[in-house]
Image (tube, helix red, strand yellow):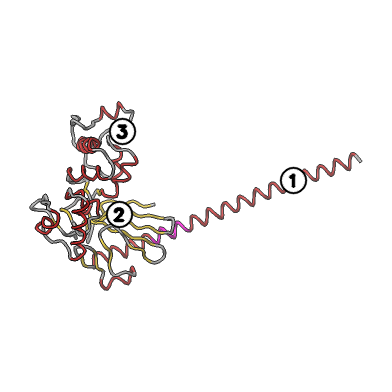
Amino acid sequence: MNERGSATLLSLLVSAVMITVGIGFNWMVKEHLKAAEGLKAKTEAMMQARSTYDALIFSILSGRLTQKEIVFGGANKLLGVQRIGLGGAGVNLANDVFVKIQDSNNAVSLVNPDLEVLRRLIVLEGGEAETADTIVDSYLDWVDADDLSRVNGAESWYYRAQSKPYAPRNFPVQYKDELALIRGFDAKLYARVEPYLTVLPSTGVNLNTADDVMLRAYLGIDQEALDKLKNYRAQRPLTSETEVFAVTGKQMPRDPEGIYFFPSPFFDITIKVGSPRSLYTMNVGVDTLPRATAPYNVIYWKEG
């Protein structure tokens, strides 16, 4: 009986081990299949994003630029839409693809920023006036070549004192997230301000595509004047500072060489594939002015 009982126990133990190994192996197979499916979906999304980018660039270069949008004409068959607005709202294409185009004239350029507009933008997005002054001075210290701090700024000694593993670049900003490193910004404030920034150069300002925040930041107007300006703009495109002054009572600060009320040739392009969760995203900055060696130039490229 003892030998028979021991054999039974041993059989049960072996069976338990085999079942456990089988369950573990089955779990591993399922996880590998899930990972393979995820990799397949992401690869397909990447190919879809790049294909959309190629079609979009061709459509932009062969299309017509207006004050508010790009009209594709005959090339719309590639994307399934005839036009895309330049205000940054974006459009949904087929196969769960989202495309957004923003020209640099409706954002604050970190290449040649209007510092007063940047100050107003920071305050409008929840920053204190003192914080805005700190950020602007720290930005100037970040991009200049010396180690002399402005009144509200920060040079390398400040970041060392804060135990930061970096110092000012002492060169123009190369990517937007770099701005989050400077004195004055925290993660929440930067996240609110970031959509209105670009690392592309601007050629002026286009009030026809700027959203509410940028209109208020650029002109320094209140909500009442903003509503009047938007109502006017809904009827016809803005074409002159005389119109802006008549509607808002504000004079536009202007550079005689700037391009106003019209998009720049510099576009921030965002392509997202997947819904409701994005599987793959491309962010590309392009200069659409043709050169002798290329029909357009890529300023930055980020995907993943």
Which three-letter amino acid code belongs to the residue tagged 1? Ala
In the image, farthest residue toward the bottom: 74
Q: Residue at x 17, y 45 (%)?
A: 114
Classify residue 133 as left or right of residue 275: left
Magenta-colored stretch includes residue 240: no
The residue beneath circle 2 is 284
Mark 3 packing: few (<14 Cα in 10 Å), some, or many (20+)? Answer: few
Q: Earlier in the sequence, mark 3 or mark 2?
A: 3
Q: Residues within 10 Å of mark 1 (few under 14, many from 20)?
A: few
Instruction: Determine whether label 3 and label 2 are within 8 Å by CB.
Output: no
Residue 293 is situated, as x and y percent measured from the top left of the image, at 20, 59
Mark 1 element type: helix
| Neighbour tally class for label 2: few under 14, some 14-19, many 20 plus, Cα within 10 Å | some
Residue at image mark 1? 16
Local SS, label 2:
strand
Residue 131 image position (x, y, % from top left)? 25, 36
Q: CA distance from mark 3 to mark 1?
A: 56 Å
* Badge 2 or badge 1: first in the primary sequence: 1
Label the magenta part by its dominant secondary structure.
Answer: helix
Q: Mark 3 vs mark 1: which is more N-terminal?
A: 1
Quarter of the view holding residue 291: bottom left
What residue occupies the far front of the structure in this picture?
224
Residue located at (29% from left, 50% from top): 195
Q: Check the image and report above or below for 68 versus 199.
A: below
**Image location of residue 264, percent across then percent down:** 19, 57
Find residue 103 and report its horizontal and vertical position in percent: 23, 56
In the rendered structure, are the residues bearing label 2 and label 1 in contact, judged by CB atoms less than 8 Å apart?
A: no
Amino acid type for the residue under numbered disc 2: Val
Mark 3 lies on residue: 166
